[in-house]
Amino acid sequence: MIALGSDHAGFSLKEKIKSYLQEKGIECRDFGCYTPESFDYAVAASRACGAVVNGECKFAILCCGTGIGISMAANKIKGIRAAACTNYFGAKYTRAHNDANVLCLGERVTGAGLALELVDVFLNTEFDGGRHQRRIDQISALEKGEKIE
Ligand code: RB5
């Protein structure tokens, strides 16, 4: 199950991603917004990422105007590793090396065609583990307020 969320500026892209996933038979749950009216990206991030943290959804895909504000909000949530991606390499390696569990996209930055390619590569790339796990553990330590050296 994939969680989806957006603010008003990412609404149209989020709707396109929802249709794309549904056409591919990939289950998703839309946490809003549900209209193009003004809607705050932190609320969308909170709702969709909550479903990742509680295990209902494996990943979340979030959209705002730039992909940045919603990624900042998502990364404040414990257990979330959100990446704002604008290119194929970033979307692939944030899974392979960072074990990202949230992909953030900017409707005003990235065209829908490329955005759907980024969704595909993000969902289909496994975490490499190994030496990268140590770095994920360091991120988790920072999240707990620990100092690392
Ligand atoms: C909304 O106008 C816009 O600020 C928001 O979608 C996002 O781009 C913020 O990072």
Image (cartoon, rainbow, N blue to C red):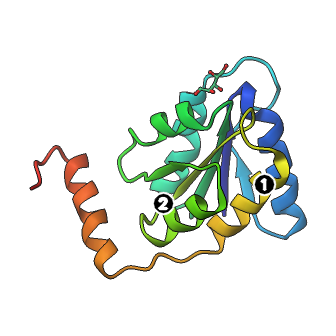
Say which of marks 2 and 1 sits in front: 1
Q: Secondary structure at mark 1?
A: helix
Q: Position of residue 86 (x, y in %)?
A: 64, 48
Q: CA distance from mark 2 to mark 1?
A: 19 Å
Q: Position of residue 106 (x, y in %)?
A: 68, 38
What amino acid type should be assigned to the residue bearing mark 2?
Answer: Ala
10 Å crowding of disc 2: few (<14), some (14-19), many (20+):
many
Residue 57 in view (yes/no): no
Question: Residue shown at 88%/54% (left/top)?
Answer: 19
According to the picture, the residue beneath numbered tag 1 turns out to be 114
According to the picture, the residue beneath numbered tag 2 turns out to be 100
**Screen quadrant of the C terminus:** bottom left
Q: Secondary structure at mark 2?
A: loop
Question: Residue shown at 73%/58% (left/top)?
Answer: 28
| Pointer 2 with pointer 1, Cβ within 8 A | no
10 Å crowding of disc 1: few (<14), some (14-19), many (20+):
few
Is 22 placed left or right of 101 in the picture?
right
Closer to the chain start, of discs 2 and 1, is 2
Question: Residue shown at 29%/78% (left/top)?
Answer: 131
Rendered-image quarter of ligand 1: top right
